[in-house]
Image (cartoon, grey):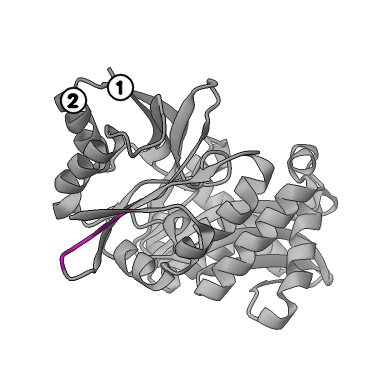
Amino acid sequence: MQLKVIHTTTEFEAMAAEWNALLDCSASRVPFLRHEYLLAWWRLLGGGEWNEAELYIIAAQLADGALAAVAPMFFSTNRDGLPALLLLGSIEISDYLDVLICPEQMPAFVDALFDHLASPLAPSWKVLDFYNILETSPTLPILQTAAARRGWHYQQQRLHHCPYIPLPGDWETYLAGIDKKQRHEIRRKMRRAESSETPVRWYIVADKEQLDTHIDDFLRLMELDPDKRAFLTSAMRAQLRAIIHAACAGGWLQLAFLEVGGEKAAAYLNFDYGGHIWVYNSGLDFRFGALSPGWVLLGYLLQWANEHQRLAFDFMRGDEEYKYRFGAIDRFIVRVCIQRA
């Protein structure tokens, strides 16, 4: 493998096609590693999460020039005040991160990557600070082995619950597999919404021409929650808008609304990618609480996902109780810190 360092946004922009083709064979095939997502994140630095950052993507090419691996990184001062190399997308708004590489090539790439990072050509980093890697990622033991070989200190810390639902591909089979009381509750709330005197309908946004209007509606619902309103700074609004447009352009946006009497009562911003539904954020108008619009919309989305043969419904970060009531299974993401001897 021949390594190449990508320092400029222009070089990064030019990698789109080969980047996404590589992701298709990678072990961690998640929407947060799509080129259009990470480019949108980089341009706005995570909605203002980072003030200063230097792009430092390391790409590996085969002899024929084909892209073989990517370590998508940037150089900055981490939360501990240390000069660090972090994964693009870190930390707050990208639920799952990793390197891009086909599993069989990973040991060779990590060795070449560490050789480069140990050389005078690399930035003056003190820690490789990799957040939000799934605990099951094959990257982790390879990083640990390569670090030990060099006498570098490897530390792994569990960060967040990331519950998900494996889907059987059939709505009734899914319902039969969850707690009886919860199954009854889902059916009851969906029937109540369907029989309401005030018309209730749900839909997935398909009109790209009106996407900005739908984004405005989604952000309005989000900001009805005080915590989400504080999160939605002007920089973060711009970042979310850029991410939604990137997902739409890439063909993996699922923005869904539930309306009550023509008013938007609930919304889910999901990603429909790689046979999975990735639940990114949501909004709710509490005036319609009697109809449980958030739960009802979630029920419809789970029904849709089963009927359309999606393999999993991933709630991503957060251990909110409702996720487990819908049958979610726990898993975790971790933070890896590697320090030179």
Task: Tell me which residue sits at (41%, 29%) in the image.
Answer: 125
**Magenta span dominant secondary structure:** strand
Which residue lies under the disc numbered 1? Answer: 340
Residue placed farthest to the front in the image? 120
Q: Does any portion of residue 254 appear in the rendered image? A: no
Quarter holding residue 145: top left
Q: Secondary structure at mark 1?
A: loop
Magenta range is 59-63
> Residue 211 location, x and y as percent?
71, 74
Up the image or down, 270 lies above or below 289; here it is: below
Quarter holding residue 152: top left
Up the image or down, 147 lies above or below 254; here it is: above
Front residue of this view, candidates 113 and 143: 113
Which residue lies under the disc numbered 2? Answer: 150
In the rendered image, which quarter contains the N terminus?
bottom left
Contact between labelled residues 1 and 2, with CB atoms less than 8 Å apart? yes
What kind of residue is marked 1?
Arg
